[in-house]
Image: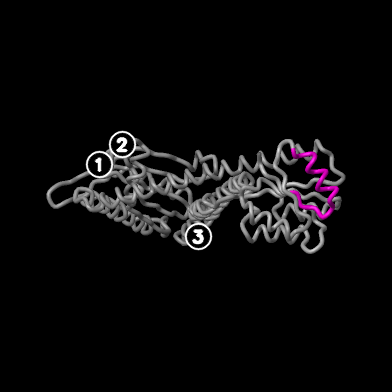
Amino acid sequence: MQRILVVDDMATNRELLQNILEDDFAIETAENGEDALIKLQEYGEDMAAVLLDLQMPRMDGFAVIAAMKRNGWLNKIPVLIISSEHAAEIESGCLELGVSDFIHKPFDASIVRNRLKNTLDLFAYKNRLEETVEKQRKTLRHQDRIIQIQAERLKEAEPFDRLMMEYRFAIMEVETRLKVLNEEFSREYKRNPIESIRSRLKSPESIYDKLRRKGYPITVENIREHLTDVAGLRVICSFPDDIYRLAELFSRQGDILLLRKKDYIQNPKDNGYRSLHLILSVPIFLSNERKYMKAEIQFRTIAMDFWASLEHKLKYKKDLDNAEQIADELRVCADSIEALDYQMQELRDKIDRNERNYAAIGAGY
């Protein structure tokens, strides 16, 4: 039988609760807070629940709750307050301290049994859930360790090292061509469409994990064949139309092969994410051969990149009580950012038209 501790300075209350619960539980009693802590020290986590009065001599219920919290018992043993207090602020304050429920005096046998049963069921469910989470955490830690070991082995393999070198060459090739386009665009239109270019080479850990999730053996051939984002670049542009113009000019180059295009600007993701993704096959020129390597380019405006960066940080925050509300607000922000992008583009077009008009008038003179 589960053991229950009843703590109340009135003997009649202790006897009444014992009569109500003794058929289903082993009952321990204490007439004040000090005796209660002695019982808790004796039985520890074998105590299934504590029914605790608030107003008692020598040590009241609030002091017992504080002591249970200090000893780490409050998270493992549910506490139900038994009190004649009906003030909402008292009940609310007790719940904020971490107690599980509130049973009002005078006692109704059915209410006492049901509230205690519900509390014990909830605590048992919480404990099972915590055990499951801990098992999953251990499994993930084990998987992460395996990934780290395999990634270290990948790093040490000469074929893998050479493959990473070739992906670095692909990044250099793409960066060079984008800078050439930016310089040419600047000369023709008197402005730079590219604000910045960022590149990254996927880590061995990420490569191993992604191949594993896709169900492919970890080989250099499978990396080359089945992963398209080992070499990744992010191109930040000033305006939306710059994105499409640059993407078109780049993918139209004779020796570039466009493998796939994902337009999340015209078709945003459900969370509001916007970007233009190109999966390309890019030539690299080695000392004795030309090879094609896959690379992914993501084109974004400054505003799109700002939103994506913040969304990524918020997405990995844990234990958000209002996660759905935050997700809705992020979508609204993404729509507002898109509207701002196109508004700024219209302003730029107006300025360009004015400059052309002034230039035409000047030419007439």
Quadrant in which residue 294 is drawn: top left
- Check the image and name the residue furthest to the bottom: 58
Tag 2, which secondary structure? Answer: loop
Q: In this view, does 365 lie to the left or right of 87?
A: left
Q: Name the residue under label 2.
A: 216
Residue type beneath disc 1: Thr
Q: Name the residue under label 3.
A: 358
Looking at the image, tell me whether mark 3 or mark 1 is earlier in sequence order.
1
Q: Are marks 3 and 1 in contact (CB under 8 Å)?
A: no
Mark 2 and mark 1 residues within 8 Å of each other at the beta carbon: yes
Residue 13 lies in the magenta-colored region: yes
Q: What predominant SS class does the magenta segment belong to?
A: helix
In the image, 1 versus 69, the foreground residue is 1
The residue mark sitting in front, 3 or 2, is 2
Q: Name the residue type under label 3.
A: Tyr
Residue corresponding to mark 1: 219
Between 267 and 156, the residue placed more toward the observer is 156
